[in-house]
Amino acid sequence: MRLAKGVLWALASLGLWLAGCSPAPDIQKPTITITQPQNGSTVSTAQITVQGTAQDNTQVARITYQLNGGQEQQITITPGQNVSFQFQVTLQQGQNTITVHAYDQANNKGSATVQVTYDPTAVHNLSGTVVSEYAGGPVAGSTLKLYKNGNLVATTLSGADGSFSFGTLAPGTYRLEAQKPGMAGSVLEGIRVPEMTSVTLIQRQAFDATATTTPPTLLITQDGTQSLEGGTFTNSIPFRVQVDTTKDYVRPMRYIYVALGRTPGSAFITNSATWTRQVFSNVEDTGNRALSGANVAGFGSASGETVYVEVVAYDFNLNRSHYLIPITFKNTSANQNNNLSSPTRVAATAITLSQAVGFFSVKSPTTLKVPVAKGTMGELTLDPEAVPEGSNLYVEVRWCYTATATPFAFDIERSTDGTNWTRVGTVGGARSSSCPDNPLDRPFFFRDASPDLTPGQTYLYRVVARGANQAPS
C-alpha cells in the first residue's frame, strides 16, 4: 500500500513537471498585406483581382475574404509561414470594402481591409510633369498625391524626366500635391477631368529644409464674400485673394500672382507686349482688385466663353499654391469683328540658358545676348524678376502685324511636323507701323517655356491673328 502511494506520488510529480515544461499557447495572430488593389483606388470595371501575402510565426492555415461585410469566403492556398493569395471579386457600383482574414492553426486571426470605388465612368487619364520652375529642369522622385472631394484617389512618383500619370479617373475636380525631402511643397487645385488631360506642377527647392513644406491655403473671391468660381463677368473681373492665416505656411508671403487664361509667374516668362498678369509682394491679402485691359486682352467672346482665372502664391519657404478657377468671360472688344490679314515675319529663337538667372534676386542681369541670325547676336532685355532659377530652355517667338485692321488676339501655335498644330498661348491683338529686321526688336512676342520642350527636337511655330476670321502666318 505504501509502495502504491509512492508510485502515485511520483507519477503526480512527473505530471506536474511535464505540465510545467509544455510550450506556451500560440496567441500571435498572422499578419496580412493586400498589395492589389490600392486602398482608396477607383476602377472602371466591376470584376477585379485581389492579391496579397500573409505571414505567421507557425503556419497560415487558411485565408478568407469578405465583400462589403458579407459572409466569409474561403480562398484556396498552400498552408505555410509565408503565403501568397489571389482571388477575384465582383464589385457593386460605388464604394466597396474588401476584408481579407488569415487564420493560423490555433485559430488566431489577422485581417486587412481596402476600400475600392467602382465607377464605370472612371476611364480618364491625367498626365503631367514636375519641374523646378516655369522653364526649369525636371524634379524626379517627388511623391504625388491626387485627391477628389478631400479623399485620396491615387499616389505615384515622378520619373527621372519629371513625368507622372494617373489612370482610371472619374470625371470631376481634383487636387494634386507634391512633396519631396529638401523641396518646397506644391499644390495644384481645381484640375478638371476629363477637360484637362495634362498639367504642369512647379516644385522649387525649399528655402529652409527644416521649415514646413505645406503650401499656403488661399481664399479666392470677388470681394471677400462672393464666390468667384462660376461667375459671369464682362470686360473686367473683380477678385480678392486672401491667405488663410489659420492654416500652416511660412510667413511672410513672397508673391501672389493673378492672371486670366495663363499660368502667371515671372514677368520675363509670362508677360508679353499685349498681355500682363498682376503681382502682389509681401501681402496676405490683395484687397479688392480687378483684371481688366491688358490683363484680359485676347480672352473671352461677345457671347461669353469659359476661361480660367489662375492664382499662384509663394510663401517665404517657396511653398507654392496654384488655383484654377473657371468663370464665364464676356469681352465686348470691337476688334472681334475685324477682318484680318496674316501676321508677318514670324521668328522663333530657341534659347538655352547655361547659367540660371535668379527668380527673386535683385542682382539679376538686365540683358542677355542671344543669336538672332548667322553671325549676328541680339540683346534681349530681362526684368528684375527674370528667368526663374533652374531654367534651361525656352523659345522666343516674335512677329509683326502692320495691316490696318487690329486683331482681337494672337494665338501662338506649335508643331513638330508642320501639319498638326497645338495652341501653346494667347496674347492680346495689336498692330504696329513698322517691322524691324532684327527679330528681337519686333514688337509682338511670346515666350514658350513649356516643360515638354526637348533640346535637339525641331519645333515649328506660327501665329494666328484672330478676329472675325482667323489668319495664320
Image (cartoon, rainbow, N blue to C red):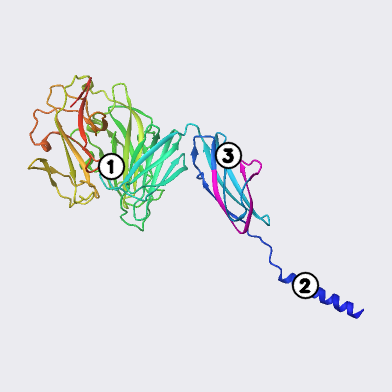
Query: Is residue 350 found inside the magenta-colored segment of the image?
Result: no
Query: As drawn, which residue projects farthest toward the front?
Result: 78
**Residue located 57% across and 40% down the image:** 88
Quarter in which the N terminus is drawn: bottom right
Between the C-alphas of marks 3 and 1, the distance is: 41 Å
Q: Is residue 241 above or below residue 2?
A: above
Instruction: Identify which residue, 391 or 45, lies in the foreground.
Output: 45
* Residue type (three-letter) at the residue carrying disc 1: Pro
> Residue 8, percent across and down?
85, 75
Which residue does the numbered mark 1 point to in the structure image? 451
Q: Which mark is residue 29?
A: none
Q: Main secondary structure of the magenta part?
A: strand
Q: Is residue 70 above or below residue 58?
A: above
Which residue does the numbered mark 2 point to in the structure image? 16
Q: What is the magenta range? A: 50-74
> Residue 20, percent across and down?
73, 71
Nearer the observer: mark 1 or 2; the answer is 2
Between the C-alphas of marks 2 and 3, the distance is: 52 Å
